[in-house]
Image: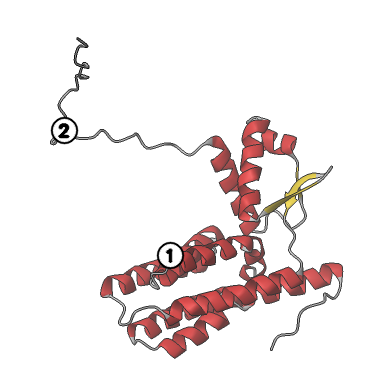
Amino acid sequence: MAGKPLKRATAPISKSAPVPEAPAREPSAAMLIAKRIEEDIVLGRRQPRERLIEQDLCDLFQTHRGDVRLALFELEKKGLVERIPNRGAMVRGLTPLEVQEIYAVREELEVMAVRIIPFPVGRKDIERLEELQRQHTAAVAAGDLLTVFYSNLSFHQVLFGLCGNACLIETIDLLAQKVYGIRSYANAFPESLDRARRDHLDMIKALRGSRRDDLVLLTRRHLQPSPEAYIKAYERRFGKADLAPFN
């Protein structure tokens, strides 16, 4: 007679036993290198079409080629770096037409986001935007362009996050990343920074007053300085560019 199959012994699971949390991971060397190069691009320290030579970067960051290559791969995924066969990596140099096309799409998506923000906007969300704008204003006054960049980025992430559409928010972020490298052209002019500061304050007022039409107009206007400054600089360097006509 066949014996009964043995049952596997299992230890009872305590419902009250805490689940140990995984320790927080430190950013890898490659990610830290990628962040430093990205900030150099944002601040205009590295120019479009500038070569990124692996050995030079190894020497600069005192690391090995593996970390540098991973960093460049991350920046390539973001659209900030491109690899040219037989030449290696370089800062991506957008043509005026590419910039124009990206900003045309950005404008429509960002306007879509502010059109679907539920009104009235909650007090805590308004206060969060006000705090970020105070950081932005202080950074503009101090000439701290890196904090200007990050506080501006956070302001718009919070603003567009109010729409609640995760796919739309992600797409807006991805397109914004592609043009990080042209921000420095407008930020070089104090009047552009002051205009951005005033636009943010007006956006907050429009949100507080549930004035959607004003918010849409501000969203469209806010995007103009960076591509205009970049295209002018490009044409001074390379000659007149062919651009698609706007309607």
Residue 85 lies, with reference to residue 100, above or below; the image says above
Label of residue 86 in the image: none
The quarter of the rendered structure image containing the C terminus is bottom right
Residue 56 lies, with reference to residue 148, above or below; the image says above
Q: Which residue is mark 2?
A: 17
Residue at 64%, 68% in the rendered image: 188
Q: How is the image coloured?
A: secondary structure
Q: Residues within 10 Å of mark 1 (few under 14, many from 20)?
A: few
Farthest front residue in view? 1
Farthest right residue in view? 239
Residue at 36%, 72% in the rendered image: 130
* Relative side of 5 to 132, left or right: left
Residue 138 seen anywhere in this rendered image of the structure: no
Is residue 134 or residue 122 the one in the foreground?
A: 122
Q: Identify the image quadrant of residue 45.
A: bottom right
Q: Which residue is mark 1?
A: 166
Q: Where residue 196 appears, x then y in whole percent?
A: 53, 76
Q: Where residue 110 appears, x then y in whole percent?
A: 51, 75
Real-space CA distance between mark 2 and mark 1, rounded to the nearest whole angstrom: 35 Å
Residue 6 seen anywhere in this rendered image of the structure: yes
Q: Secondary structure at mark 2?
A: loop
- Residue contact between numbered discs 2 and 1, judged by CB atoms under 8 Å: no
The quarter of the rendered structure image containing the N terminus is top left
* Relative side of 100 to 206, left or right: right
Residue 204 lies, with reference to residue 67, above or below; the image says below
Is residue 231 or residue 100 the one in the foreground?
A: 100
Residue at 43%, 64% in the rendered image: 166
